[in-house]
Amino acid sequence: MRTISCTFLILLASCRHQSEPQTTAPQAQPAAAPAPESVPAPAAATPTSRSDRAPSVQQRPTMWSRVRDWPDPVAVVQDTPIARKDLLADLQAEVDGGVLTNDVDEVTGLRAAATALEARIDAVIVHKAVPTGAILAVERAAQSELVAEQTRAGGRDLWLKAIARRGQSEEGRKRSLLTQAGLDALVAKDVPPATEADLRERYEHNQKLLTLPAAVRVREISVPTTDKPGSVLAGAAETKLSAQVLGDQLTTPTSGWLTRRELGPERWAAVANLKVGLLTPIVRTSFGVHRLQVIEHRAERKQSWAEAKVRLAAYVERFRTFEAGHKLLLKLRAAAKVQRFSPFDHPPGGLPLAGDVTVGAFEEDDD
């Protein structure tokens, strides 16, 4: 009887052990898919985390999950291929600038990639439409606008930081300026000049918009740094700044007037009430340390007709040129031979930029 009872207890314990659920250690899943071997842009396909938090298991696919499935090239525009690595570089620039995040869902990532691809397609289309004899003039116009942008930003280094915050690379911004300069050249002869009556009407009805804001002309010296005040690198930047001030390495006076919007709140606060000829103390912004010298002040005032006429003519011409360029681009797109390969094989106006039309192409396969 005792033998039977012991056997029964052993069987009962065995049954309980088999009925208990088996627990296994969770397997960590990488935050982003590894880059395909054929893509020579590992920084884009294996991005680093921008978060200080500890990594967590990310179950949903990210924008990088299907990079290995993208074709190469992603499109061909009139026999000119657009490489996958170039499109990945555009996405990485948006991640670096904070416009996108590495763990954004793949549908949103695909929309961003499709938009970036269309910008590259437009650049190729416009470049091929510009006559050979006008290419040098277009390049000079784009370069002139580039210099103007950098001057308004306070120098090339500050300009690079500004476009980076918009998710653009230096190459991408130059390409955009070249595309716009090409369109401007193509429509220049078709844009009618503004008449005296047009300008007078705008002047009468836009007095508030034509008010000249308070502004200054300055000399400036800047040292880029994003480190917090008191850190070793921030201290080194301030030391370098002081040495350059002692060496009188400030920039030449700005040719135009700089307003609060163009200088930014920190630099404007330092110069708004500063006497002409004096230097500001060190001014810290999110992108560097600066010292400025005021050359001239201008108080806020209304523009006279003679002043406004020149500005209005430039504005009207620019607006009409931009409008004509947009219409021309639509015609060029319609006439161009463009092949977009899956998952980007959508015509302009039919891109998967809304809704869930891209989910089907990217959902996980059922095993």
Image: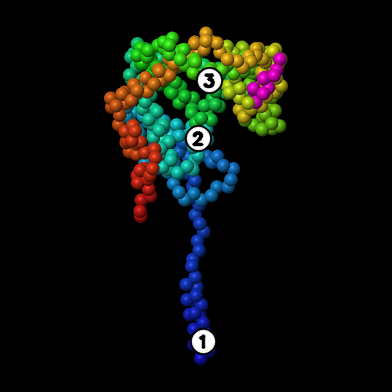
Place of residue 359 in the rendered image (x, y in percent of width and height, measured from the top left)? 37, 45
Place of residue 116 in the rendered image (x, y in percent of width and height, measured from the top left)? 41, 31
For mark 1, give the secondary structure. helix
For mark 2, give the secondary structure. loop
Q: Is residue 165 above or below residue 248?
A: below
Task: Give the residue at x 58% y 47%.
Answer: 54
For mark 1, what is the residue? 5
Compare marks 2 and 1 and give the one earlier in the sequence.
Answer: 1
Place of residue 8 in the rendered image (x, y in percent of width and height, measured from the top left)? 49, 83
Q: Please provide the residue range marked out in magenta.
A: 266-275
Q: For mark 2, does the 10 Å Cα neighbourhood hold few (<14), some (14 to 19), or many (20 or more) residues? A: some
Residue 35: in magenta span: no
Q: For mark 3, does the 10 Å Cα neighbourhood hold few (<14), some (14 to 19), or many (20 or more) residues? A: few
For mark 3, what is the residue? 209
Please tell me the numbered disc located at residue 99.
2
Q: For mark 1, does the 10 Å Cα neighbourhood hold few (<14), some (14 to 19), or many (20 or more) residues? A: few
